[in-house]
Amino acid sequence: MPKVLLLGGTTEASALAGLLAGSGVDTTLSYAGRTASPRAQPVPVRVGGFGGADGLADWLRENRVTHLIDATHPFAATMSANAVAAARLAGTPLIALTRPAWAPQQGDRWSHVADVGAAVSGLAGPARRIMLALGRMHVAEFVAQPQHHYLLRFVDAPEAAPPLPHHSLVVDRGPFTVEGDIRLMREHAIEVVVCKNAGGTGAQAKLAAARELGLPVMMIDRPAIPERHEVHDPADVLQWLDHAAASIAERGV
Ligand SMILES: NC(=O)c1ccc[n+]([C@@H]2O[C@H](COP(=O)([O-])OP(=O)(O)OC[C@H]3O[C@@H](n4cnc5c(N)ncnc54)[C@H](OP(=O)(O)O)[C@@H]3O)[C@@H](O)[C@H]2O)c1
């Protein structure tokens, strides 16, 4: 029987956990521990870092994991690189379940930047009203452009006030709608949206809202991740699992 470690923290990972539980696959879902109240899951959950690629490789060996699935966020580049290295070290087959990146549509006014640092520099200039749709991890970096008013939207209420001198904070886990995001952007008189190219449907509403309102979007492109077997459809993960399990059984591992 396969024994799966599923690296999660995304909607896709939660959906896959449901599918794996439904198929009776022995699965542990792993969270980094960034969210105070993660959703209840139908499989056992472990929380916290592994201690780099070596730590993850040890965890795979100690827990006799036969299959590693990386369904982390496309911007969780350290975890994904560690997964590639650990899979190689432990000899554990790895698959990544990712969302296709968003592509601009007619009417979109996107500019592209390579990373959060480039987004911060790109905001030099007179004060504007900016929707910073990045979660809470990178907010402190925008202190370097303190002239702007920032609209922040977090999943959990922060323990300490965000360090930006001018900001409004909305605590909302979503799912978000285009109508709701248009309303929010109008209410806060937003002039620019800054976001990561996360892909998927959960966070797409803000892009349609910006298009509808004719607002520019500063799109932070995805970080590079080492080459790995990557699919976009959970059904492909299940098929890979069947296939890989059969070959493990053949080898008598
Ligand atoms: N980055 C985003 O924009 C974003 C958005 C939504 C959700 N998330 C989710 O939030 C989590 C952290 O993202 P991040 O960008 O901080 O990752 P990251 O920068 O790639 O990872 C930093 C460290 O956090 C630990 N870690 C990350 N994901 C983990 C997981 N699923 N299970 C156990 N440890 C994990 C690892 O620690 P060790 O080296 O000690 O193992 C990793 O080296 C991930 O689960 C990701 O899917 C991220």
Image (cartoon, rainbow, N blue to C red):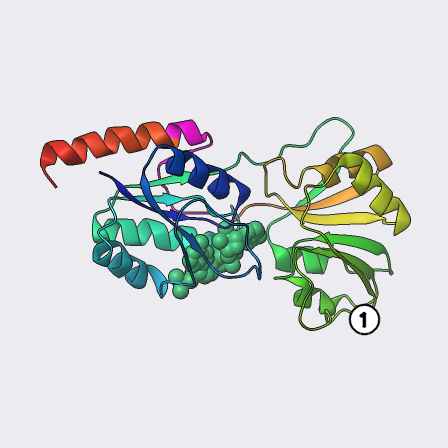
Return the x and y of residue 74 as percentages of the image width and height. Answer: 51, 46
Q: Amino acid at mark 1?
A: Pro
| Residue holding disc 1 | 165
Residue 89 makes an appearance in the image: yes
Q: Main secondary structure of the magenta part?
A: loop
Secondary element type, mark 1: loop
Instruction: Name the residue at 78% across, 52% down.
Output: 131
Return the x and y of residue 202 as percentages of the image width and height. Answer: 63, 39
Instruction: Name the side, left or right, on which 113 lies relative to 163.
Output: left
Instruction: Name the side, left or right, on which 50 lies relative to 252.
Output: right
Q: Is residue 72 magenta?
A: no
Per the rendered image, the range of residues in magenta is 224-236
Instruction: Name the side, left or right, on which 233 lies relative to 187.
Output: left
Instruction: Name the residue at 32% across, 38% down.
Output: 25
Residue 78 makes an appearance in the image: no
**In the rendered picture of this protein, how many numbered marks are placed on residues?**
1
Residue 157: name its quadrant: bottom right
Instruction: Name the side, left or right, on which 174 lies relative to 198.
Output: right
> Is the CB of mark 1 within 8 Å of ligand 1?
no
Return the x and y of residue 139 as percentages of the image width and height. Answer: 68, 63
Residue 20: name its quadrant: top left
